[in-house]
Image: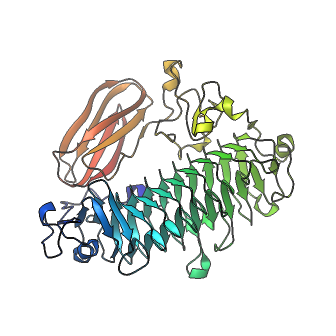
Amino acid sequence: MIKCFLQFFLIAISVSSLIFSQTNYYVSESGSNSNNGLTPQTAFASLQYAADMVSAGDSVLVLEGNYVGFDIRSNGTQNSPIVFKAIENNVVIDERNPVTIDGINIENATWIMIDGFEVTDQPRAGIRIVLSDFVVIRNNNCHNNYRWGIFTGFTDDILIENNSCSFSEDEHGIYVSNSSDRPIIRNNHSFNNNGCGIHMNGDISMGGDGIISNAIVEGNILHDNGYGGGSAINMDGVQNSKIYNNLIYNNHATGIAMYQIDGGDASKNNKIYNNTIIQPSDGRWNILVTDGSTGNTLYNNILISNHGFRGSISIDAASTTGFISDYNILVNRLSNDDGNSNMALSQWQSLGYDLHSMIADSESQIFVDHTNGNFHLLQTAQTVDAGTNLVLPTVFEDLDNVSRPQGIGFDIGAYDYIGTTEVVEEHIPQSFHLFQNYPNPFNPSTKISWQSTVGSWQTLKVYDVLGNEVAVLVDEYRPAGSYEINFNASNLSSGVYFYRIEAGELIQIKSMILIK
């Protein structure tokens, strides 16, 4: 089974106790390395000094200011990661760290979290992670760096979420490379990069198997990339991965490309679901499948190209084995000879592809305001209720974290239409599901959402690792439907907690992490 990084900091219930944070060190622009660093008033001045001090379970809490970057080569543990967190706004790293030519460098380290920094004007990467596993990069703004906003190499089980990566002068916003497995890249905003918005490259020349496997790329907004070449999402040697709920528009190369150049093998057996991809007049194909990239599946995607020749899908003969494409919105330009010529949808359907797909209406008939970047669906859009539920169990929500489906069926594209005139019955979920809380880790509040197929007495409770009940969030009858509640843990200590939903005979449990 795929090792799910969404459960990355989880522990077994058998664990008897947990001390999540051992020491909090503070760093301030006005501090001094001769201080003890234990309070904001006695903060260190240097991030590197703090990085040299930390061990498993420690946190480095950074106050507003401009800083030199840092290099970290220490190990946290699953139960006690090392955390670097900006606790005020305008925490800016605008000088390279003392060891490499990057802002933040994580190397030969495990269980590290980087949260909330602005990293700019670096000679290479804003944040670089190599030979390091179980790393979280979240809520950072990496902009105007020379090569990459965020770069990873030979790093398994990394979570890259809620970051902004922009204006990389030479290459990509986010770059995952070198045989890295199980990365999760979600809810990032990558734009105006010379190369790709997100580039995944197995790169066998550097060693390893040259394959990136079991990636999850979801909920990202990628636009205005690729002036110098490079897709919004490049997949070179990426296999058995899920790419869904991404909004991709005005990128000047391909939308999503699956191929092999540097990878150890072609990009195979990937699931491309519920993406909205709008290509400009100077763009390339919405989706490119080439170099023997077999076994890929495309469902519920909006694929609109404004190019005069290039269209929605281009595939070469070597990649057609196991290729499935259906329930998409397309332009009337498709290719089965690697983009050398194109065919109409009717010809494409004669090959067995996209039998339930439709030619796209004008963008003004589909989207609320596409000229200003609002790609939410109009009530009358042809995409509403026109998709397939074959995207389950991968897709449960849309780009806005709204439960799917909102109507009688799945909508096509990254967003599900939320109307005010639908009958109540249409809102009944098709499956019982407890979602991962968001954000996670959190401090001190997080949202917990769930959906129930039946009306029943429902309870939602929170437990500590010893099994002690610490909060009752819901204890009442609720009809079938989708729900969300805010959990405030300001009265609890840092650690791992479990939340349990019970609706009639249906029960699910998930874990979450509180960091203070």
Q: Is residue 55 above or below residue 464?
A: below
Instruction: Give the camera-side residue of 503 and 144.
Output: 144
Q: Is residue 447 above or below residue 179?
A: above
Q: Position of residue 444 (x, y in %)?
A: 24, 47
Residue 181 visible in the displayed image: no
**Taking 159 as reference, is 349 above or below it?**
above
Residue 253's place in the image compared with 55, above or below, is above
To which quarter of the image does residue 509 belong? Answer: top left
Query: From the viewer's perspective, is 161 left or right of 171?
Result: left
- Report the side of 308 relative to 171 (left or right): right
Place residue 379 in its image quadrant: top right
For residue 71, say whether it is visible.
yes
Horizontal and vertical percent position of residue 358: 75, 36
| Picture quarter with the C terminus | bottom left
Task: Report the residue at 56% width, 81% height from top.
Answer: 207
Residue 346 in percent (x, y) is at 85, 40
| Left or right: where 117 falls relative to 14 | right
Residue 296 percent coordinates (x, y): 68, 55
